[in-house]
Image (cartoon, rainbow, N blue to C red):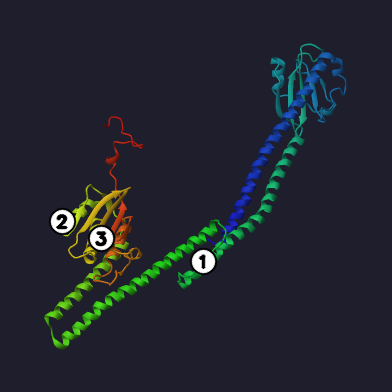
Amino acid sequence: MSRRSIQLRAVLAAAAAIVLVLVAVGSAVDLLVARHLHASLDRTLRQRAVEVSQLSASAPAVLTRPGALDSPVGGTQLSVEVIDRRGRIVARSLALGGQVLPLGGLVGSAIAHGASGYRDARLGTGPVRVYVAPLAEFGGKAAGGAVIVAASTRDLGETVASLRLISVLAALVAAILAAGPVALLMRRALRPIGQLADAASEIERTGDPRRRLPEYPAADEVGRLGKTLNAMLASLEHSRDAERRFLADASHELRTPLTALRGNVAYLRRHGQTPELVEELERDAERLAGLADDLLALSREEAAEAPVDEVRLDLLAQDAAEADPAVEGRAPWPVRVRGDRAALERALSNLVENAHRYGPKGGTITVAASEDRGSAVLSVSDEGRGVQPYQAARAFERFWRGDGGGPGSGLGLAIVRATAERHGGRAFAEGAVFTIELPALRDLSESAGTTNDGQPEKGTP
């Protein structure tokens, strides 16, 4: 989707919205004005009919004089006909000439039942509004008849049509006038997005995650987008650097046993085998195999999906204590997590092996499983001095070893951290205590006897 298409669609949407709003308002105004004009015309017709009725009752002789019914009311020229109870014309406006007002069924209803009413009709070629009203039973020739008052609605219709046309034109003009500012605002709003897109394209072309997108000081959506994308690029750069360091460290770790293995093979070729040489070859092969296994385990752990099985950490602690006489298990109650049992067993085994390696000879290793504030805690501690605070953050890095180095691949604690993170938790060290903290899996039955406020439910002792 191009920037121009977004800008064009925004301008069209704004113009369409303005047109729709103004057309809706104009239609409402047209309706109100038309109703008001029709109501005013109906009042005028009724007022004229009342005057003619009064004239018929009080001065019937005046009613029949020529021109007596031709006076306009409120500037509106009205046409009047007065008929008797037999439907014969008694008096009429001179302005009618040879035309006769359309009567319809209203006249019969007015004479027979004394009912008045309005209707729209046509007089000649023009539309008219007609009002029919009954006359009193006394007062001359028209007694008991009816009066018909009519007025042309041509001007009224032209007024409403003109108002409707003005509303439509105003809507179009407003839409055109608003399109310019909207286009300008959209261009200014989309310019930073275009710059971000250009910078992102350049990063894609070069494949260099160290480059950054332009950031804008405004605390709006574009500013947040630029900061978020730069944070993502920083994360990608960190991941790439971590991969490069991992490859370099793995190459370094592999180089040492491979060099020793090649040297021993060369010695074997020149001087033949000895028991010491065979033992050295076996150690080199075991070290390579262990390193390969740990690399594979770490890779699988980082790429594995979230676990779905239920695992009891207290049972893992008990199994570790039963398998190793130097391990003391402390798990007074069940501790459940959603996890991968094999992965958690490997992580616990790595922690126990780490305690054996760096703890004092013959010392006791304690494996404890507990639950604290909704978190399941599995910890391994030894009787040694452990890691220093400045070392605790690096203890779980790949290929990191404590002071003096030591045997092992340097991946055991990295596998522990990867396992903890895959389970939605974390791994950390404090002195000689290495801990895996995971979200605890609570059983609904544990809280079934209490309500939300901690009070026992009815019937619960």
User: x and y percent of residue 158 in the render?
Assistant: 75, 39
Q: CA distance from mark 2 to mark 1?
A: 57 Å
Q: Which mark is first along the chain, 3 or 1? A: 1
Q: Nearer the viewer, residue 441 or 393?
A: 393
Q: Which mark is first along the chain, 1 or 2? A: 1
Sort mark 2 into few (<14), some (14-19) or many (20+) by Cα contacts within 10 Å.
few
User: x and y percent of residue 231 in the render?
Assistant: 46, 63
Q: Nearer the viewer, residue 159 or 299?
A: 299
* Number of the front mark, 2 or 3: 2
Task: Using the rendered image of the protein, determine whether residue 102 is visible from the camera's viewpoint.
Answer: no
Identified by mark 1, the residue type is Leu
Q: Nearer the viewer, residue 192 or 340?
A: 340
Identity of the residue drawn at 37% across and 69% down:
242
Disc marking residue 454: none
Disc marking residue 347: 3
User: x and y percent of residue 226 in the render?
Assistant: 51, 62
SS for callout 2:
helix
Q: Which mark is first along the chain, 3 or 2? A: 2
**Do tag 2 and tag 1 residues touch (Cβ < 8 Å)?**
no
The residue wearing badge 2 is: 322
Identified by mark 3, the residue type is Ala
**Do tag 2 and tag 3 residues touch (Cβ < 8 Å)?**
no
SS for callout 3:
helix
As drawn, 239 above or below 457: below
Q: Residue furthest bottom?
A: 270
Q: Nearer the viewer, residue 71 or 336?
A: 336
The residue wearing badge 1 is: 213
